[in-house]
Image: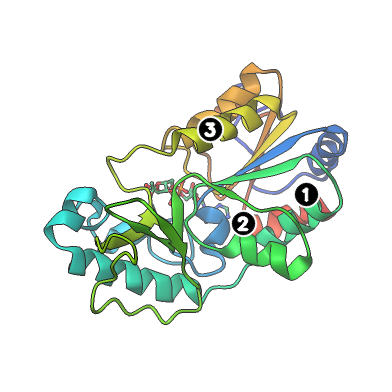
Amino acid sequence: MDLRGEEMPSPEPNGEELQEVRGWLLEAESVLVLTGAGISAESGVPTFRGGGVEPGLWDRYRPEELATPEAFARDPELVWGWYSWRRTLVGDCRPNPAHEALARFAAGRRGVHLVTQNVDHLHEEAARNLGSSLLPLHLHGSLFRDRCSGCGKEWDVQPKGPHGTMPLPRCESCHSLLRPGVVWFGEMLDAGELDVAARLAQQAALTLVVGTSGLVYPAAGLPRVTLEAGGRVVEVNLEPTPLTPQAHRVFLGSAARLLPLLLDG
Ligand code: OAD
């Protein structure tokens, strides 16, 4: 089924379509995988806008109160309290079969690249567990990184914690407050990383888009870059998204069920 027309996608994966996309993946010299919160939902990481196994993160908190530079300037203890809660919650999560299928897929071949909007560590953990070199480019930063709000220096933080924040952490070099190494509302993405992501999207013979609402730019614009360069787009999501009409094939359902079918087959 070609979803760039009017038809709605079928709720069940179609064996012929799976086989066809496997063929596209086999012949592709370069594959870009773009992931969003949906790929980690079955690991227990709350999504941003619902649709996962947990309520969406923003269902309980107003982002403008917590995930902005203004909120941090106003009340760093409140912001750090929220991030340390999230570090503990996410640090206890493990990769699911979707992360593992991607890591396995990349272990056996060259030219597979991964760009994620997620700030969790689950792609890295799956790669480490399975001896794969598929490390993600974190377009929106990482929950497990501290960044100095003064000099910009960064440190990795162990997902396993502990994640207390009292007293508030300070930079070893310049003693300014540290902040979480994530992109907040109203902040720009790292221009160099965005360039790399756009180049990967342009080079990709196929971009596989997994578990993203397709609402947040510039990440949501990457599949269009692949299409305009003549590549294919395949989407995996629980439900149709604004990216669905661009996709050559769409598989509706859980990423943890569908990615092993698609990539291990
Ligand atoms: P969202 O929470 O907006 O969307 C999650 C998507 O995953 C939805 O389209 C769901 O239908 C889908 N989904 C949920 N569970 C799934 C599953 N088990 N299998 C497959 N799909 C599933 O998350 P993102 O699109 O990643 O940015 O959000 C993009 C950005 O919005 C985030 O990175 C964050 C937020 O603002 C920043 O923090 C800068």
Circle 1 residue: 262
The Cα atoms of the two marked residues, 3 and 2, are separated by 17 Å
User: Of the residues shown, which amino acid type is indicated by label 1?
Assistant: Leu
Task: Pick whichever, 130 or 210, lies toward us.
Answer: 130
On the image, which quarter does residue 236 sit in? top right
Measured as percent of width and height from the top left, residue 226 is found at 64, 25
* Residue 125 in the figure: left or right of residue 142: right
Measured as percent of width and height from the top left, residue 98 is found at 67, 59
On the image, which quarter does residue 209 sit in? top right
Circle 3 residue: 243
- 1 and 3 marks in contact (CB < 8 Å): no
The Cα atoms of the two marked residues, 1 and 3, are separated by 19 Å
- Quadrant where the N terminus is found in the figure: top right
* Residue 91 in the figure: left or right of residue 247: left
Callout 3 crowding tier (Cα within 10 Å): few <14, some 14–19, many ≥20: many
* Residue 189 in the figure: left or right of residue 30: left
Task: Pick whichever, 144 or 46, lies toward us.
Answer: 144
How is the model colour-coded?
A: rainbow
Q: Earlier in the sequence, mark 1 or mark 2?
A: 2
Residue 111 visible in the picture? yes
Q: Secondary structure at mark 2?
A: loop
Residue 242 visible in the picture? no
The Cα atoms of the two marked residues, 1 and 2, are separated by 12 Å
Measured as percent of width and height from the top left, residue 42 is found at 56, 65
- The residue carrying mark 2 has its beta carbon less than 8 Å from ligand 1: yes
User: Of the residues shown, which amino acid type is indicated by label 3?
Assistant: Leu
Q: Earlier in the sequence, mark 3 or mark 2?
A: 3
At 44% from the left and 47% from the top, the residue drawn is: 140
Circle 2 residue: 254
